[in-house]
Amino acid sequence: MTEENKNLAELAKEYDASQIQVLEGLEAVRMRPGMYIGSTSKEGLHHLVWEIVDNSIDEALAGFATHIEVFIEKDNSITVVDDGRGIPVDIQEKTGRPAVETVFTVLHAGGKFGGGGYKVSGGLHGVGSSVVNALSTQLDVSVYRDGKIHYQEYRRGHVVDDLKVIGDTDRHGTTVHFTPDGEIFTETTVFDFDKLAKRIQELAFLNRGLRISITDKREGIEQEQHYHYEGGISSYVEFINENKDVIFDTPIYTDGEMDGISVEVAMQYTTGYHETVMSFANNIHTHEGGTHEQGFRTALTRVINDYARQNKLLKEKDDNLTGDDVREGLTAVISVKHPNPQFEGQTKTKLGNSEVVKITNRLFSDAFGRFLLENPQIAKKIVEKGILASKARIAAKRAREVTRKKSGLEISNLPGKLADCSSNDATMNELFIVEGDSAGGSAKSGRDREHQAILPIRGKILNVEKASMDKILANEEIRSLFTAMGTGFGADFDVTKARYHKLVIMTDADVDGAHIRTLLLTLIYRFMRPVLEAGYVYIAQPPIYGVKVGSEIKEYIQPGANQEVELQAAIERYSNGRSKPSVQRYKGLGEMDDHQLWATTMDPENRLMARVSVDDAAEADKIFDMLMGDKVEPRREFIEENAVYSTLDI
Ligand code: TTJ
């Protein structure tokens, strides 16, 4: 039967049936939110914002929106505003409902309204706005289109009333406002400005020319940030290298398109040794790399070797430079946009589309090859840097072959200071790196001996930024960490050999403690990256205050934004007419005895630990560059900006 032949009763029945499906669809989202947004934790809460913002980004990429604004409202609800064409409001033949209503009430109804152009965003979960609607106590949408303002509101996914015209307008665009449901987001419904701002800045880098802002209207913490980069990912590379010395001023930038797949690469070499290659597919950070990175790496190595041979910078007898050689000191951002991206890997952040290898390789090779020909001075610097890296690599390899047997990093040489645990089950075992011998002592007697090992370290560990490999390997604190972990070093590194699946950094809550933590994170970021990627690295969170009645500690206060409020509340709880509790401020771990250290910081039942992500460590690495690098100015600025905080701890 064709549409025309159906009678009204049949159509009405079909409509009812489809409405029931709609509600069942959104009910399913509320029953299993994690399936749609990953989790209902803080992470999932913030995911709602990206699910909405992605739609506006698509409209910007299609060439229609130029401004996107995100607001955290006073009541922790979110508003997203764009100046695109506005979600279509016309009645769709298939459903008999306005298109915009379908967008918010039907699962998986994306933004494809025949308008050509493909959806670039939302590849990771990409489940659409109806999921945000289902998980919000209230959501409203205003569409500015054809001279009218169209408005509709929903509660927990249910339509409140039909789409209505509520006024005239001479602008165009879409505004969505929503309040996440506390019944779903039980961990928190409070948005984190810095977290939103960081990703919004990244979106601005990744989408050249886009103007995007974030405004926090919450009382007492009002602030706003506006982002706009005409340089796109070139600006991103400059931002990453901000505090580093570079071997040429302007990043090399290429873009191109092939078979509907667009590829952009920006890159610049620092004078350092560290490699930072970040890749994105449809604006999603592909932490695990994939075919776009593979195409880029292959092309980079081949083009540099070809150029070096043709210009006799490499002699016939010389070996080719390796990939590691040509990436020493490299900062690069690769961004591809694909109509049908395949995400693979453990965290679904690895691009899998095989055709992308060839396309990235071809587009980047052509452009980079041309760049080298046109800029012989820069080309020479790049090749010379690679040759230097290769010489260092060959020398280090020789040295390693001689000393391999005696490198001392074998497990048979477990460091004397290590108090190991008795269990052999690495998945259950934890290594605590503890600052100072006295805290180390308390940790040793307070711990769970079966599963917790303690490695005390003393003072500041080596600055790995400046030191050569052999000096790093000669440093006792570093050696004992690598030996204890059992993962080997450098080319021999093997994360599957890790003797502990939790590596916990436990330092004092003061400036020195923060410094040691930064040093350790930098060391781990640069030389134990797979351990970070596996999610094994944690930071212990010892309490900052103890509230005491007589000699008994009644309550501990953890550090955090609310620490002072919580302290006052605790003082009141233990005050009576005659007396107030006393407050102990813990400056160092050493002030706690073994029982206290166990109860507050080490006991898996009660402790708070922060897992360190690769991004957190990269941040530490960036700060570290600033504090330890050659440039004085940014260091002074940082110290001045942070002086208020650091003096608190002195
Ligand atoms: C799709 O093609 C026809 C013209 O309108 C296009 C569209 O849907 N544009 C659009 C959607 N711009 N902005 C949105 C949008 C913005 C927000 C804040 C939230 C949602 C779900 C969509």
Image (cartoon, rainbow, N blue to C red):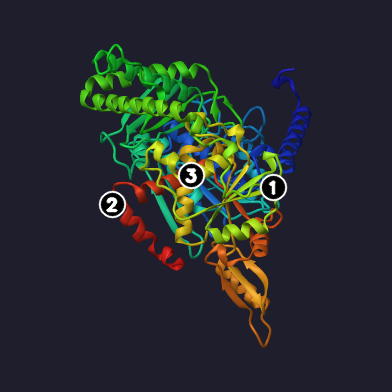
Query: Disc 3 designates what residue?
Result: 478
Query: Disc 1 designates what residue?
Result: 451
Q: Can you tell which quarter of the image residue 641 is in?
A: bottom left
The amino acid type, in three-letter code, at marker 3 is Ile
Local secondary structure at mark 2 = helix
Q: Residue 632 shows which numbered tag?
A: 2
The amino acid type, in three-letter code, at marker 1 is His
Badge 3 crowding class, 10 Å Cα cut-off, few under 14, some 14 to 19, many 20 or more, is some
Q: Position of residue 550 (x, y in %)?
A: 67, 80
The amino acid type, in three-letter code, at marker 2 is Val
| Residue ID at (32%, 21%) | 368
Q: Which label's residue is closer to the chain start, 1 or 2?
A: 1
Q: Which label's residue is closer to the chain start, 1 or 3?
A: 1
Separation (CA) of disc 1 from disc 2: 44 Å
Badge 2 crowding class, 10 Å Cα cut-off, few under 14, some 14 to 19, many 20 or more, is few
**Residue 121 seen anywhere in this rendered image of the structure:** yes
Separation (CA) of disc 1 from disc 3: 22 Å
| Residue ID at (29%, 48%) | 631
